[in-house]
Image: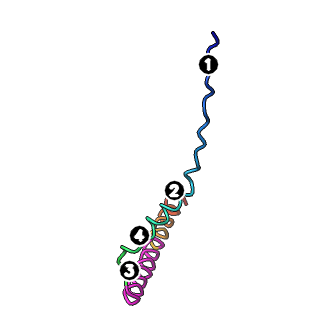
Amino acid sequence: MAEKTSKPTKVVEKSKQPNRIARWWRETVGELRKVSWPTTEDAWRLTKIVLIVMAVMSLFLGLLDFVFASLIRLVLG
């Protein structure tokens, strides 16, 4: 008696990549619709605050750098 051998059938799976990308895009757009966007006036006010804080901090750090560099020169010089 000959044994009947069955060939394994190949299951062709479609790539999940386009579905993942489409789902990611839909979810991203959905999340962006939930965002509470600032008004133009609020955005400008916050931008000015950030620029002022950056200027103050850069002056402060520049002063600290100058003081420590002077101290190092005094100690080593």
Tell me which label, 1 or 3, sits earlier in the chain.
1
57, above or below 15, in the image: below
* Residue 3 to residue 16: above or below: above
Give the residue at mark 4.
30
Q: Within 10 Å of the Cα at label 4, are there few (<14), some (14-19), or many (20+) other Cα atoms? A: few
Element marked by disc 1: loop
Q: Which span is picked out in magenta?
A: 39-62
Distance of mark 1 from mark 4, alpha carbons? 55 Å
* 2 vs 1, front mark: 1
Q: Which of the labelled discs sits on residue 37, or is there none?
A: 3
**Front-most of residues 70 and 47:** 47
Which callout, 2 or 1, points at the residue further toward the start of the chain?
1
Mark 4 belongs to which amino acid? Gly
The residue sitting at 64% across, 12% down in the picture is 2
Instruction: Pick the residue in front: 71 or 25.
Output: 25
Residue 4 is labelled as 1
